[in-house]
Amino acid sequence: MKFDPVSFVLLIPAAAAALLALLPGYRITAQLNVLAALLTFAMALSLYFFGVPKAGPYLLVDDLNKVFIVLTTFVGFTTSAFSASYIGHEIDIGRLTPTFVRFYHAMYQILMFGMNLALIANNIGLMWVAIELATLTTVLMVGIYRTHEALEAAWKYFILGSVGIALALFGTILVYMAARPAIGEGLPAMEWTNLLVHAAGFDPALLNVAFVFLLLGYGTKVGLAPLHAWLPDAHAEGPTPISAVLSGLLLNVALYALLRFKMLLAANPAAIAPGPLMVTMGLISLVFASFMLYRRRDIKRMFAYSSIEHMGIITFAFGMGGPLANFAGLLHMTMHSLTKSAIFFAVGHISQIKSTQQIADMGGLTVTNPVLGWGLVLGVVAIAGLPPLGIFMSEFLVVSSTFAREPWLALVLVAGILIGLGGLFLRLNTIAFGEPRGPIAQAQASYVPMFAHLALVLVAGVYLPPALVSGFENVAKLLR
Amino acid sequence: MRGLNFDVAHLLAGSLVLVSFVQLYQDRLYALLNIYALHALVLALSVAWQAFAQDAPHLYVTAIIALVFKAIVIPVVLHRIIVRLGIHREIEKVVGVGPAMLLGIGLVALSMVVMLRVTADADPLAREDLAFALSVVLLGLLMMVTRRNAVSQVVGFMSLENGLVLAATGAKGMPLVVEISVAFSVLIAFIVIGIFLFRIRERFDSVDLQALDRFRGERR
């Protein structure tokens, strides 16, 4: 039998989930979780070396989703390493019982499975099912602490998430209806590969309505304002590794679904241009979230709003379209995933040391915990978009490509980014510098995942390998 | 092809919208659950008729799932839950009956205008079905936003899902994968909800979402 990395990317998380649900003892399961995530990442990486199998009726690997799969499995791997030390502390202080930890690890792998399946699916129905699966697992994980706040957050996330996902299914059905006259009944009319080839023959009016539903539906999952209400609560109340995965990965997966449908509309000359819709929603999210950053008292909630801000920028860039803006959007998405999860790694350990998430109760971290404190400072400097880190470069690309085409939009964009920067530094000042506040203890933390991410972001800001650039350029052309 | 096929399908899909309206003004949980069972029953009939009219036997499976699972199992279980929780009193509403009905009529009109206009080329059966399905979806959404009680929000969500199943079966030849996955997702969703309801019961002694609102992280 030929070596087939595609099915391993799906099989490893599925098998690991079953195994982790059965095994007792959190130390072993935490390590197994890391091992499974590492193997999945290795398989995803090997997609680049072993060549891509031909698209089947259900699975598809192309240049676009390869980038997403590698990013997802990489952050999934580093987060599992962070999660091992985080969960160890939660067990020590009795916040989680071993039964829940077993459940947590199994859910973690099911989530990885769901996201990988959504990325690899060649069938719009299968993709929808996978995103629903990923959503439901995160709902359960957000509610895992079973406090009042966690339950409210999980409930809110569940209701808003399922409404979004229901609207997305309606859009999916409409796409099938539009494709049926051109392709014929049955499975072929739900395959990406077929849909793209025949897109020009679809009924444009039906396709337009479908895209509106898909934008509202998957846009809820991306966290675009005004559909973002679930996002800050879910980030703040769940375990921090889940906040990292939500921000770094699940939002991207939903965005990936939107991008695929956008390609479909772009291939049909009579349909509306999807760009302006995405540009509008992106800008609204960016400006809204930037202002919201100023009033946050909870550290995880603040970085959740920062995620909305950056998803806004990314959606904006993809909405602008064209090779340069798409390239910038893709780069920004990668940099944001790496940076934001690194920040959440730091935040997780900080809130464990201070045993609170209230910003007012923490302070002077660079003095008491220099490694952690400076790590957070570096992460915030990166996420705010200061040179020489990677996000500066991607934001610079987004802004400059917009200035060349729509100067007025670029002004709003820059204003939003600057407002966000101010909000972040205001809070960072309280947390990292000044008089030490709150309990002082050394974290039993593994700093490797956090600094690995930050190092990658730093390197990307200074030097992008030509292979990466040409890969991203290919994808950017594919997206139109 | 405006024969008997069309008339019956039209009648059943229209009844589904009607039952959605009836759901909208129920102010007791017991009655609401009964109406939901009726909703699912009409859906099952409608899907079965589509299976017959389109000569697509796999749709009968979807119809049976709707009948057994949604019309019988879920209402019975929810009945038990609300009795155990002791909340078969009146439902608190955000919007009164009158405004809710007016809003509902507006939403139905909206979905007719939108769907009938964009599907001008599709066959009439699918057109009407899709327009009705969107109405049911929007009415389900309306119910979710006008209710404060967790159980009735869940009922709103499930009737929304019924609308999606109606749309999926109306789309001729749509692969079975999707119908089963829809049913399956409802199952998962229901399990999740069940767990949640029990946890909420455990923690708050109430399933009123207003009680949840007090615990917002920001307002301390």
Image (cartoon, grey):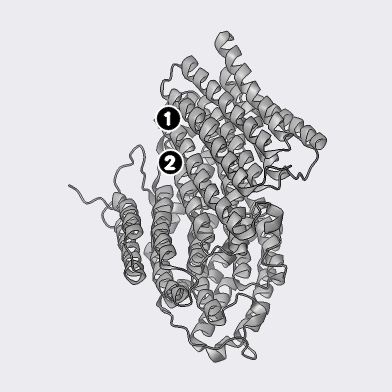
Eyeballing the image, is A89 above or below B195? below
Task: Tell me the SS state at disc 2.
Answer: helix
Taking depth in this image into account, of A474 and A438 the one nearest to the observer is A438
Q: Which mark is residue B175?
A: 1
Which residue is label 2 attached to? A126
User: Taking B3 as reference, is A197 left or right?
Assistant: left
Question: Badge 2: how crowded within 10 Å, few (<14), some, or many (20+)?
Answer: many
User: Taking A201 as reference, is A73 left or right?
Assistant: left
Q: Residue furthest left?
A: A1
Eyeballing the image, is A125 above or below A257? above
Look at label 1 and name its amino acid. Answer: Pro
Q: Chain of mark 2?
A: A
Give residue A77's quadrant in the image.
bottom left
Eyeballing the image, is A248 above or below A480? below
> Residue A36: where, in percent of width, then height?
32, 62
Eyeballing the image, is A475 above or below B23? below
Question: Badge 1: how crowded within 10 Å, few (<14), some, or many (20+)?
Answer: many
Look at label 2 and name its amino acid. Answer: Leu
Task: Tell me the SS state at disc 1.
Answer: loop
Q: Alpha-carbon distance for marks 2 and 1? A: 11 Å
Q: Which mark is residue A264?
A: none
Rendered residue at 39%/51% (across/down) = A63
User: Taking A64 as reference, is A282 left or right?
Assistant: right
> Residue B205: where, in percent of width, then height?
64, 56
Q: Residue furthest top?
A: B3
Rendered residue at 55%/77% (across/down) = A351
Rendered residue at 53%/55% (across/down) = A139
Q: Chain of mark 1?
A: B
Give residue A430's quadrant in the image.
bottom right
How many numbered circles does the render carry? 2
> Residue B161: where, in percent of width, then height?
57, 36
> Residues at marks 2 and 1, common chain?
no
